[in-house]
Amino acid sequence: MRTTLKLSLWFALPVSTAILIGIPALSDPLPPDLTYRPLPTMPFSDAKSIDEAQKRAVMERQQAMLRQRYDLADKPIDGTMMSGGRKPVQGGVRVKLPEGTTWEDLSNLTPTEIRDRNLLPSGFKPLPHVKQSAGGQVFPQAQIDAIARLEQRDLRRFDVDFDLPDHLTPEFPPPIFLTTHPELGDVSRGEVLSIRNFYEIMNGLITPVQMEGLRLLLTPFPQEEFNQTEDRKVAQQSLGVACLDCHANFHTNAAFHQTPDVRPQSARFRLDTTSLRGVFNQQIHGSKRSLRSVEDFTQFEQRTAYFNGDHVSATRKGANLPDRTNQVAMMAQMQNIIDLPPAPKLDPFGRLDPALATEQELAGEKVFMGKGRCADCHVPQTNFMDNNMHDLKLERFYRIGEVTNDFVALPDGPIKTFTLRGIKDSPPYLHDGRLLTLADTVEFFNLVLGVKLDQKEKDDLVAYLLAL
Amino acid sequence: MRNILTLAILAASVSGAWAQIGNPAFMGADTRMQKPGDPAPNQTNNSDRVFARLVAAGGAAEVDFAHMSADRASAESVKNFAQRMVKDHDAANHELAQLADTAKIPLPEGLLPDQEAMKAKLNDLQGHDYDVAYMAGQITDHQRTAHLLEWEITGGEDANLQQFAMKTLPIVLEHLQLAQKIHAELTDASGGIR
């Protein structure tokens, strides 16, 4: 007995010593609202009237930043429409060069030289949210109007508006292609799917399980800025938002948000809505979270896309926690039948059919597979993805910690590879939408990967991307 | 006044000349505004006050440890780093103290408990061990400071303090990268070097 006691004292001793030494060595944690959302301190009506009065200045500041970075003009490529034939694809390089430089000059400098001389075009840097301090989901006007018409539900924020011109976003409403009915083509009837009309549009085309999944994907649930509490950015107490409010018709309407995965607030980068087309072939989900199934993604988004990854705030405002077996699985099954738009020039392995492709497209494919190194990640055979995340290390080219419109530009870190199938349908490009056209993406990757393409190779590459 | 003006100009050149715009929901309900959403000069919220106190205490400790390390460090790179910390942090500490004084925020005196503990630990070490411990502490301190500065940029409402945060952040991140590099050289590790 005594031995046992002695022994246990021996064991207890290092523990208690550690506690004695450990406590003073621990530092204070950083303040709680670096991680958690604080409760509002201002009465709702005061915050609302301030937000409304400030909205013009917010939008002017954002527009000034956009104009400084980009040529925002309406310059469509002749005869090139998006898959539904409703909107032309925009052309040309829109990112502005620093004065006195050319793209060729830049490609001949090292990343360190570009950083030290502050020569990275600012349009290549991370793109700020329209109002960094508030963040949250911002819908384009077309979506706001459609949901108001179909559901009398208000998606208009009183503090901010959507910031990009309409011609630089995807066609609206986007067409819907089903893997289960390729012969039908677009089944959207030119309408936006909503909780009111989905049954009428889809009955007869999908299974009961898919229909129930669709209903859930269209059901609004409380969200950080759209809810019934005083902490909201919509005038009336809101029913919330639905998954397909951003992923309109399972594609994207270019609604944007901030990454739920980063804190503090000023460091959260912008996220452009990803298309759900072709999600059946995708092995990882969430640009930063690398979730391994669309079921996980569907389930977790109720606390991430909806509540910025803050389950505490979600609990206060009304979290929707879909049942894994009976609801999540059905939502996933519906998403998994959404096909990519037809690409008639591609063979079953994602390679161009020489009998159908133009010479320029074939030349572009050669650059894509070779000198341009695009196919190192965007592998044609696996739907132009590699199911990996990669770190482009863009911070080699700029000084980190610079602040634009309250947004701190920091390294993006690893981001998942997105598919390039149907890519002409989903501007703007990159995870935050900082690149407005495909020509911009070619210039961006030419610089970041250091592949030194000439003008003909760049043009060929754009022609190829349009064929995907 | 001239200091504030210089700061404002500096911050404007950093941020591309656009003033910061906060989320009014999280501003103090008693905030006096010069325009809606634009707090009158030297109006502070709780974030501003906590920020000023924590960063001032951190900055003072930086200088304290750096003076100590200028004598006790053995590696040349660590001595140089310590000298740079004295120079950069002295200037920033002074500026922050002035801004806090203008905003009537009392700043803490002396070291915080965790800084005392770090000082006691460093006092017991010598040579290479001292260098490694000092640089490891510097990495943590600069990580924390960077996050406090980032927090203030959207969380605070005193424009002077926010501009101070914007101006200081890239320098603190530079210090962090330098500390990571020196620590990696001392330990033959690659942690943190991108």
Image: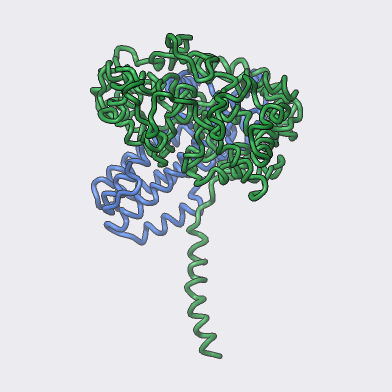
Residue A195 location in percent, x, y? 71, 30
Decide: is B145 above or below A434. below
Residue found at x 62% / y 21%: A160
Which chain is the one coloured green? A
B1 relative to A463 in the view: left or right: right
**Image quarter hosting the N terminus of chain A:** bottom right
Residue B83 location in percent, x, y? 31, 41
Decide: is A165 above or below A277. above
Along the line of sight, which residue is nearer the eye, A443 or A215? A215
**Image quarter hosting the C terminus of chain A:** top left
Residue found at x 66% / y 45%: A327
Res. A372 image quadrant: top left
Residue B14 location in percent, x, y? 43, 23
Would residue A64 be visible to someone looking at this image? yes
Decide: is B110 above or below A414. below
Res. B90 image quadrant: top left
* Way the structure is coloured: by chain
Colour used to depict chain B in the structure image: blue
Residue B93 location in percent, x, y? 45, 36
A344 relative to B193 in the view: left or right: right
Along the line of sight, which residue is nearer the eye, A437 or B16? A437
